[in-house]
Each structure stands twice: as structure tokens, then as C-alpha cells.
Image (cartoon, rainbow, N blue to C red):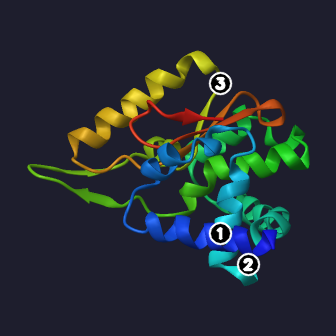
């Protein structure tokens, strides 16, 4: 009985928000702001993609290792300097899995953003910070969010949700900024 009610609520919730933004979804369901809020998103994902449940969690260690090996082969100065500064060879496996997220965008080409009157192609640093924002100190959070917001406004592109990792890889805090930075959830 509870399972049927849960499925009906999931269907209804997804139907109501099919034409809305993720920011609207977060505002409508304050539960998402809680530390366990990801469970609701996980339920929705599992409903939409039944055969993919927990796929990322079970495959991520293998995927991140493959990406890490690919990153090590790249001849990119920013990447080499970053890995050297972060002493990647001394990190444990969990910390390396998080670090891969930081440099993953360097495996892709930076897209050209067409905006009037000029175009913009993000730098490698902007590409990295645009995927998952890594910052060392929580006091830098608002400044980084504002910089991102300003850049998006400048080129008239929508602000996308972004995961934020604060602190060292092994002992980090994680947040999500969903819209203009006024809604940052742990």
C-alpha cells in the first residue's frame, strides 16, 4: 500500500514540474534542502530510469579510475600543475575519486557561447569551476557564486545548478547552488 502511494506521489510530483526549473522544484519541496534531501531526487530518478538504479554509485570507482588514467596522459600544463600542487600521488582512493570530478571537464572542449554583441569561450579554469565548484574556504563561497552569476548575466545565459565542494578532498563539505546563489543547500 505505501509503495503504491509513493509511486502515485512521485508521478504527480514529476507531472507537476515537467515544465518547471530545478530551482522551482527545490522551492516547492523544502525537504530537498535537508542533508537527506537527495533521497527524494533518488526516488524520482529511480522512477524515471528503473533499470539504472544506483548505477553511478556502483560504477563510479571504476569510471573515475579510467578518467584519472586518461587525465594523467593529457599534455595540459594547467592539469599537470594542479595535480602536482594537490599531490595526487599521495591521496587515498576516495580523495582521488573526488579530485577526478574537478579535472573531468579538461577531457572536453570548451564550448563557444554565442552572445550579442560578442562571443565567449571559457578558459580552462572557468571550465573546471563551471562543472563542480571546488573552494578551499567557506568564506569564499558567496564571492565565487556572485562571480559566476555576473558572468552568466554578462552573456545572457541561464545560471545552471552547480555542486560545490568546500575543503580538502578527504574532509569536504558538499553543497548545491540551484539558482542565483540565494539558495545553497547542503
Please give the name of the residue rendered at 62% of the width and 20% of the height, measured from the top-left corner: 138
Q: Quadrant of the C terminus?
A: top right
Compared to residue 179, the image places residue 112 above or below, namely below
Q: Quadrant of the N terminus?
A: bottom right
How dense is the environment of label 2, judged by Cα within 10 Å: few (below 14), some, or many (20 and up)? few
- Residue 75: quarter of image: bottom right
- Residue 148: quarter of image: top left
**Residue 62 shown left or right of residue 181 in the figure:** right
Is mark 2 in CB contact (under 8 Å) with mark 1? yes
Which residue matches tag 2?
A: 52
Q: Tell us which disc is closer to us: 3 or 1.
A: 1
Q: Position of residue 44 (x, y in %)?
A: 64, 67
Marker disc for residue 45? 1
Q: Secondary structure at mark 3?
A: loop
Which comes before the other along the chain, label 2 or label 1? Answer: 1
Q: Tell us which disc is closer to us: 2 or 1.
A: 1
Amino acid at each position: 500500500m505505501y509503495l503504491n502511494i509513493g509511486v502515485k506521489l512521485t508521478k504527480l510530483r514529476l507531472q507537476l514540474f515537467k515544465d518547471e526549473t530545478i530551482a522551482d522544484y527545490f522551492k516547492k519541496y523544502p525537504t530537498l534542502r535537508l542533508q537527506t534531501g537527495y533521497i527524494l531526487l533518488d526516488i524520482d530518478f529511480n522512477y524515471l530510469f528503473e533499470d539504472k538504479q544506483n548505477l553511478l554509485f556502483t560504477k563510479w570507482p571504476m569510471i573515475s579510475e579510467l578518467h584519472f588514467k586518461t587525465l594523467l596522459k593529457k599534455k595540459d600544463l594547467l592539469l599537470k600543475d594542479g595535480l602536482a600542487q594537490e599531490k595526487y600521488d599521495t591521496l587515498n582512493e576516495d580523495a582521488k575519486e573526488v579530485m577526478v570530478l574537478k579535472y573531468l571537464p579538461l577531457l572536453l572542449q570548451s564550448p563557444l557561447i554565442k552572445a550579442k554583441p560578442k562571443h565567449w569561450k571559457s578558459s580552462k579554469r572557468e571550465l573546471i569551476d563551471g562543472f563542480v565548484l571546488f573552494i578551499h574556504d567557506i568564506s569564499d563561497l558567496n564571492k565565487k557564486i556572485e562571480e559566476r552569476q555576473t558572468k552568466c548575466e554578462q552573456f545572457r545565459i541561464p545560471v545552471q545548478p552547480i555542486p560545490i565542494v568546500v575543503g580538502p578532498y578527504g574532509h569536504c563539505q558538499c553543497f548545491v547552488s540551484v539558482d542565483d546563489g540565494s539558495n545553497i543547500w547542503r
